[in-house]
């Protein structure tokens, strides 16, 4: 009988710890951070296909976002599909793509995270036309502009679609690094 009580206590303790750990994981996953995998080459060379990242969700609700940050957001027209892109344009600014460059409020945007990449207009943000970014909306673009489907094609990203900001690449182990402000 003593062996049964001892075994029962060990099992009870084990399941109690398992339930607590699961609850903590779920709280962190849904409210603080989320594990994601980069798919495709739209953010190359900043991110490689199949890299694993952690997206932090909490600070998005408490403080604003800023240009150059890598953000995770829900696709504007495909509910549930998460994308990772860089924040280029803020609400109320004007944006224009011309001669391979991005201009914000008529000033050329310096993008040190790009490596000899030219930006071309697409079907939504066309070459040579100045657009005003609506209130509560953002312009997002991939770092590998020729291979990126982004705001140039499908339009602005509403504030409520932003899920979090990329903070850490944790896999593969050989490429572990912090992500911050567009400078790596």
Image (spheres, helix red, strand yellow):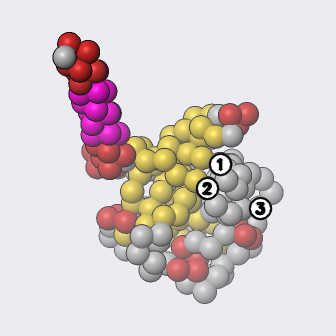
Secondary structure that dominates the magenta span = helix
Q: Which residue is mark 2?
A: 38
Front-most of residues 42 and 172: 172
Q: CA distance from mark 3 to mark 2?
A: 20 Å
Q: What whole-number distance in Å separates the C-alpha atoms at marks 3 and 1?
A: 22 Å
Magenta residues span 10-25
Secondary element at tag 2: loop
Q: Is residue 48 above or below residue 168?
A: below
The residue most toward the bottom is 123
Up-down: is 93 above or below 56?
below
Which residue occupies the extreme top position in the image? 2
Q: Residue at x 66, y 69 (%)?
A: 148
Crowd tier of the residue under label 3, counting other residues whose Cα lies within 10 Å: few below 14, some 14–19, many 20 or above: some
The answer to whether residue 41 is left or right of residue 28 is right
Question: Within the magenta stretch, is there residue 155?
Answer: no
- Residue 171 placement (x, y as % from top left): 64, 40
The residue under label 1 is 51
Disc number at residue 117?
3
User: Of callouts 3 and 1, which one flags the residue occurring earlier in the amino acid sequence?
Assistant: 1
Cβ atoms under marks 2 and 1 closer than 8 Å: yes
List x then y, in percent, for residue 28. Answer: 33, 41
Tell me the CA gap for discs 2 and 1. Answer: 5 Å
75 to the left or right of 98? left
Query: Is the C terminus in the top left, top right, bottom left or bottom right quadrant?
Result: top right
């Amino acid at each position: 009988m003593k062996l049964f009580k001892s075994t029962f206590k060990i099992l009870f303790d084990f399941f109690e710890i398992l339930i607590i750990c699961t609850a903590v994981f779920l709280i962190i996953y849904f409210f603080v951070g989320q594990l994601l995998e980069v798919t495709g080459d739209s953010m190359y060379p900043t991110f490689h296909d199949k890299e694993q990242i952690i997206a932090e969700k909490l600070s998005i609700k408490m403080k604003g976002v800023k240009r150059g940050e890598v953000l995770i957001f829900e696709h504007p027209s495909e509910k549930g599909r998460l994308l990772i892109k860089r924040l280029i344009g803020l609400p109320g600014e004007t944006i224009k793509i011309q001669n391979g460059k991005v201009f914000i409020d008529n000033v050329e945007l310096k993008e040190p995270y790009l490596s000899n990449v030219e930006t071309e207009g697409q079907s939504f943000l066309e070459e040579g036309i100045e657009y005003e970014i609506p209130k509560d909306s953002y312009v997002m673009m991939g770092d590998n502009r020729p291979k990126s489907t982004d705001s140039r094609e499908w339009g602005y990203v509403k504030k409520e679609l932003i899920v979090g900001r990329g903070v850490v690449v944790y896999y593969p182990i050989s490429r572990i690094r912090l992500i911050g402000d567009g400078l790596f």
